[in-house]
Image: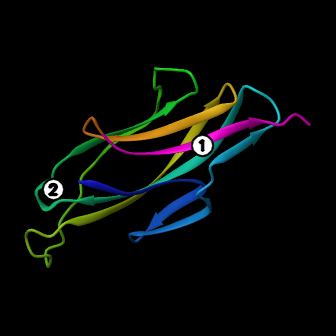
Amino acid sequence: MRALFLILADAAQVVEGKLYMLGGGWNTVFVDALPASRGSNIAIGLEVASDEVEVRHSFRLTLLSPGEEAEPEIGRGEFEVGRPPETPGGTEQRLIAAFPIVLQLGQQGRFIVRFYVDGTEMGQAAFGVVHRPQ
């Protein structure tokens, strides 16, 4: 299994295997006050090897804050990628998913969202938080 992409977005959804996104690819959040909370979405694309389809996998999302070592969990779940009947054996499958997340932002600096499948890091998306009081 390998990650194809991991994108932060204002809104994202998957319909019939296609990703629809608004405000995707941002890397900076401007906040009026700290701490702040921000609802967002994360879009993920995975290529799943033929020997990993029709197998239950667990995933989790974490958020690493500046200067911290702990990575609080911001999402978790399970998935299983099927194989369409007409697909020949040995063919990898693609999984496209979008998840709502809530980012708890306690300070300025660089944050990292990490995506794990079965305990292995598959990708990350970094972004900065800038306090801009009004």
Residue 69: x %, y % from top left = 47, 20
Identify the mark nearer the N-term, 1 or 2: 2
Q: Which marked residue is nearer to the observer: mark 1 or mark 2?
A: 1
The amino acid beneath tag 1 is Phe
Classify residue 5 by image quadrant.
bottom left
Seen from the viewer's position, the closer of residues 56 and 66 is: 66
Q: Residue 52 in the image: x percent, y percent?
A: 15, 54
Badge number at residue 127? 1
On screen, residue 112 above or below 7: above
- Element at label 2: loop
- Is residue 32 rendered to the left or right of residue 44? right
Asked where in the image residue 83 lies, by quadrant, the reply is bottom left
- The residue nearer to you, when weighing 93 against 108, is 108
**Residue visible at 10% across and 57% down?**
51
Q: Which residue is mark 2?
A: 54
Q: Is 24 a magenta residue? A: no
Q: Mark 1 Cα within 10 Å, few/some/many (few <14, many 20+)?
A: some
Disc sitting over residue 113 in the figure: none
| Range of magenta residues | 121-134
The amino acid type, in three-letter code, at marker 2 is Glu
Residue 103 percent location from the top left of the image = 60, 36
Does residue 97 lie above or below 32 as drawn? below
Of helix, strand and loop, which one carries label 1?
strand
Q: Quarter holding the N terminus? A: bottom left
Q: Is residue 125 in the magenta section?
A: yes
Q: Is residue 33 left or right of residue 77?
A: right
Distance (Cα) linking label 1 and label 2: 34 Å
**In screen coordinates, is 66 left or right of 17?**
right
Q: Residue at x 83, y 37 (%)?
A: 132
